[in-house]
Image (spheres, rainbow, N blue to C red):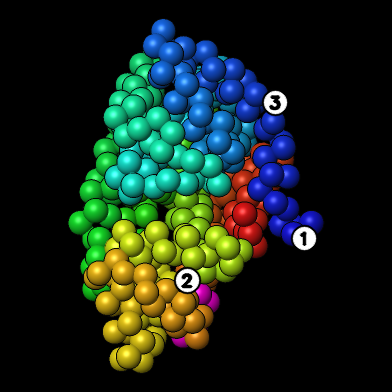
Amino acid sequence: MTDSSPSAAAVLSLIADDMRQVDAVIARRLDSGVPLVGEVSRYIIQSGGKRLRPALLLLVCGALGYRGDQQFNLAAVVEFIHTATLLHDDVVDESTLRRGRATANENFGNPASVLVGDFLYSRAFQMMLDAHDMRVMEILAEATNVIAEGEVMQLMNMHDPGLDETAYLQVIRSKTAKLFEASARLGAVLSKADPQVERACADYGQALGTAFQVIDDVLDYTGDAGELGKNLGDDLREGKVTLPLIAAMRRGSEQQHAVIRRAIESGALEELDHILAIVRETGALEVAQEAAASEARRAMSAAKQLPANEHAQALLQLAASLLQRRY
């Protein structure tokens, strides 16, 4: 990383003290009196995620001058909502590994994962009430609804080789980017920002979340060789169509298109190595990387509309770091 584009970890060090207060809220609000609830929740929350969604909320609050305790409460809320979606996602996808660890459903079983996910959603809505702000409720209620719609859209798109870039982006803007958008918007609402600034914060979050997911899909093809087969194999087995595959089918020969199409439709992995080669040979990775870069630049443009201070600069740098993301 260059000095002008530090890693996300370096950027987020600015809010390290704030994040510790968020962690304290999380620990306190996970106490339900039912041991399994706390055990499963802590297992996934402590699994090494970068907490980007609560971090966005904290950075926007810092950029716009909000210093109240509700930033810690609502940052915990968005982390609970994110964690609930992960628990449910892994059950739907029948995943066994996340970030190198066994998934909660693998460790505790599907019923426990689904029910603890439900607990985290309901606890998050309890905590929203503490803000005593109907606008906060509206933002988070809409976000959870759109995320659920995105999950259903993705399910409907499984094993569909005809999926195009527009439909792909619609899914990730709903399923992934919506909570980024809501997190940044909540920071503006807590700060009593004017509508133009609130819109800029929401645009920043949506663009950042979209770039984050597109890059995640690209990294399936450019990461460590030991991980490559597992990650791409999972996507193909589940019939998930990501931007690198869409671009490869669009740019490849009829024969190459047919190879990818068969794999998506069947979920079979026999031609996995051939598909990896096609994705690289057709320039599909560069197409996807440019799509992610375009979103990162859109996020940077939105961040420039905020007051000039170290927190706003950190938002700019966080978007810039995605252009070189390797984590």
Q: Does the CB distance between marks 3 and 2 fall below 8 Å?
A: no
* Vertical order, 43 against 33 (above or below): below
* Vertical order, 311 against 93 (above or below): above
Instruction: Give the class, few, some or many, for how many residues have Cα within 10 Å of label 1's Cα (few <14, many ≥20).
Output: few
Task: Choose between 60 and 15: the one closer to the eye.
Answer: 15
Instruction: Return the residue at label 2.
Output: 288
How far apart are the alpha carbons under marks 3 and 2?
A: 36 Å
* Vertical order, 85 against 117 (above or below): below
Instruction: Give the class, few, some or many, for how many residues have Cα within 10 Å of label 2's Cα (few <14, many ≥20).
Output: many
Dot 3 amino acid type: Asp
Location of residue 146 in the rendering, given as x and y in whole percent from the top left corner? 28, 43
The magenta segment is 282-286
- Judged by its main secondary structure, the magenta piece is helix
Instruction: Give the class, few, some or many, for how many residues have Cα within 10 Å of label 3's Cα (few <14, many ≥20).
Output: few
Q: Quadrant of residue 16?
A: top right
Residue drawn 43% across and 13% down? 35
Q: In which quarter of the image is residue 243?
A: bottom left
Q: Is residue 122 visible?
A: yes
Badge 3 or badge 2: first in the primary sequence: 3
Badge 3 or badge 1: first in the primary sequence: 1
Q: In this view, does 234 lie to the left or right of 224?
A: left
Secondary structure beneath disc 3? helix
Task: Choose between 222 and 133: the one closer to the eye.
Answer: 222
Instruction: Return the residue at label 1.
Output: 2
Instruction: Return the residue at label 3.
Output: 17
Q: In which quarter of the image is residue 278?
A: bottom left
Location of residue 155 in the rendering, given as x and y in whole percent from the top left corner? 24, 53
How far apart are the alpha carbons under marks 3 and 1?
A: 25 Å
Badge 1 or badge 2: first in the primary sequence: 1
